[in-house]
Image: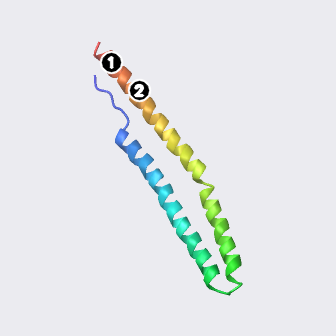
Amino acid sequence: MSMTWIDEEAYENMINALNNFMKQVTTQCDVIEKAAEDCIDNTDDENIKPSAEALGTHIKNIKAQYPTIEEVIKALQEQLEKAREARRRAEAAANQ
């Protein structure tokens, strides 16, 4: 009797993709924040400050989504581990 299991590689790929996404977003947000700071530091234009502050707010809103992404990653990891454990139990029972 053959059983179909989840595609573990697909789960792992999704977990890795979500982790990489957060790293890339963090890196790009840091680049944008630094550029805004440099712009403020290198110009005397008062109009830049409100834009930089708005940009900072947007970046905080983006980073505020990280806990949701982390919850999805955790759920995927838990599902993957449960499926692996079920497969191990089924294989052990079949080998008895």
Is disc 1 surrounded by few (<14), some (14 to 19) or many (20+) residues within 10 Å? few
Three-letter code, disc 2: Glu
Locate residue 39, reporting x and y percent: 60, 80
Q: Mark 1 touching mark 2, by CB under 8 A?
A: no
Q: CA distance from mark 1 to mark 2?
A: 10 Å
The mark found on residue 92 in the picture is: 1
User: Residue 60, image x and y in percent?
Assistant: 64, 61
- Give the residue at x 42% y 49%: 16
The quarter of the picture where residue 57 lies is bottom right
Left or right, 80 with reference to 32: left
Residue 2 shown left or right of residue 73 in the figure: left
Image quadrant in which you'd find residue 35: bottom right
Name the residue beneath numbered marker 2.
Answer: 85
Secondary structure at badge 2 equals: helix
Q: Amino acid at mark 1?
A: Ala
Note whether 44 is above or below 85 in the view shown. below
Is tag 1's residue or tag 2's residue first in the polypeptide sequence? Answer: 2
> Which element carries disc 1, helix, strand or loop?
helix
Residue at 32% x, 21% y is: 91
Residue 1, above or below 41: above
| x, y percent for residue 65 | 60, 54
In this orientation, which residue lies closer to the viewer: 39 or 19? 39
